[in-house]
Amino acid sequence: MPADADADAGWAAAGCGAPVVAEIRFAVPGAAAAGFPAAARAALGALARAGGFRSGRLARALDEPASWLLTTEWDGPGPWRRALSAFEVRYALTPLLAHAVDVPGAFEVLAAVDPPVARGAGGGRPGVGPTEAGDGDVDHLARTYRSDRAADADTAAPGSS
């Protein structure tokens, strides 16, 4: 879809590549349940100190108390990968990975809508302006991003052209 079509639909085009949402799901058995929340908060704290970190949350499933989710948002894939390499993060996160569920965990954000903000506030995000809301008093920030993923990312071999 052309950028103009996005703008016409109330979506502002973002000026940079896509942010990354990284999720790690955990299945924590009863024996490990007591210490898991504190250890996961320590890992989240270590991630939060890394460059490019935007936000993070630790959550537990409402209907399955052994299921946990650590979600973080990053400026892009580079900051996320560099954060995982940091000693402090590896030290805090590695023991938790024994309980990690093997599912895809990194996603590039291609569209986003933020909660309402006061008119003209812009949400404090550079290059992102509010879009008109139906009531005229409050705006929702709606953005689309271009993908940084190479078209041949799934098939390209190292050194191929």
Image: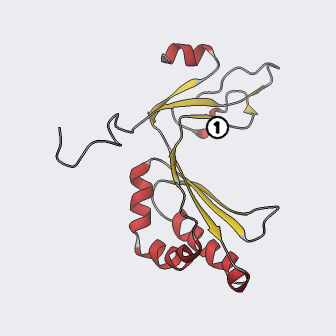
Q: Residue at x 45, y 56 (%)?
A: 80
| Three-letter amino acid code of the residue under disc 1 | Gly
Give the class, few, some or many, for how many residues have Cα within 10 Å of label 1's Cα (few <14, many ≥20): some
Q: Residue at x 81, y 61 (%)?
A: 62
> Residue under circle 1?
123
Residue 120 spot, x, y in % from top left: 67, 27
**Relative to 132, 46 lies left or right:** left
Residue 13 spot, x, y in % from top left: 52, 25
Residue 5 spot, x, y in % from top left: 55, 14
**Relative to 22, 119 lies left or right:** right
Instruction: Spot the residue most to the bottom.
Output: 31
Say if 107 sits above or below 64 in the image: above
Say if 118 sits above or below 131 in the image: below
- Count numbered badges in the picture: 1
Quadrant location, the C terminus:
top left
Say if 144 sits above or below 85 in the image: above
- The answer to which of 47 and 110 lies nearer the viewer is 110
Q: Residue at x 40, y 70 (%)?
A: 86
Say if 79 sits above or below 134 in the image: below
- The answer to which of 73 and 126 lies nearer the viewer is 73
User: Which picture quadrant has residue 51?
Assistant: bottom left
